[in-house]
Amino acid sequence: MKGSRGRRRIAVISRQGDLIVSHGSVHKLVEGAVAVCTINLGVGTEALLQLKPVYLFGGAGYLGACFVMRDKGEFARQFQGDKLPLDEAFIKKFLYVCRNQFQLDINADTFRKQLENRLLHLIADRSSNAAVQD
């Protein structure tokens, strides 16, 4: 939820006792969680790093390693406590590949060159695929 409307809605839900709002460290919150429900990338990534099940209600690059909620009521059908959707070894490999093959360090001196190389490679792949389809 964005802006003041979202904050007001969160406050109402919190007062009803259906939600606890915390401003603590996300690392500590995830550490104490059985599972994590999220709509975005940050908290879900931390949960996967701590090998906690992630229930994704939005979009993220790691949806292949979590439970994805697409329809109303799906959480109630899919929730399995602290059970991971995939085996631990697969999730570790998945995170390794994401970190080492897809992410770029924007603070690195080589960032622009790495990004340029990846984009050129992507364009070349798409061009060759288009030529094959013609």
Image: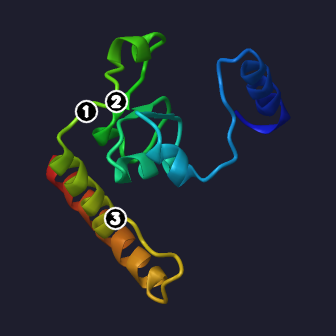
Point out the tag, 3 or 1, that comes first from the N-terminus.
1
- Are discs 2 and 1 less than 8 Å apart at CB? yes
In which quarter of the view is residue 129 placed?
bottom left
Residue highlighted by disc 1? 85
Q: State the separation of the CA atoms marked 3 and 1.
A: 20 Å
Q: Is residue 23 above or below residue 55?
A: below
Q: In this view, does 130 lie above or below 83?
A: below
Residue 97: x %, y % from top left? 25, 61
What's under tag 2, amino acid-wise? Phe
Residue 77: x %, y % from top left? 35, 11
Left or right: where 83 falls relative to 30: left
What's under tag 3, amino acid-wise? Arg
Can you name the residue that lies furthest to the front here? 32
Q: Considering the numbered disc 3 on the image, is that residue within a helix, a strand or a loop?
A: helix
Residue highlighted by disc 3? 99
Q: For mark 1, does the 10 Å Cα neighbourhood hold few (<14), some (14 to 19), or many (20 or more) residues?
A: some
What's under tag 1, amino acid-wise? Pro
Q: Considering the numbered disc 2 on the image, is that residue within a helix, a strand or a loop?
A: strand
Q: Which mark is residue 67?
A: 2
Query: Can you see residue 95?
Result: yes
Residue 123: x %, y % from top left? 33, 64
Point out the tag, 3 or 2, that comes first from the N-terminus.
2
The one nearer the camera, 87 or 73, is: 87
Q: Residue 69 carries which label?
A: none
Point out the tag, 2 or 1, that comes first from the N-terminus.
2
Residue drawn 36% across and 20% down? 79
Q: Considering the numbered disc 1 on the image, is that residue within a helix, a strand or a loop?
A: loop
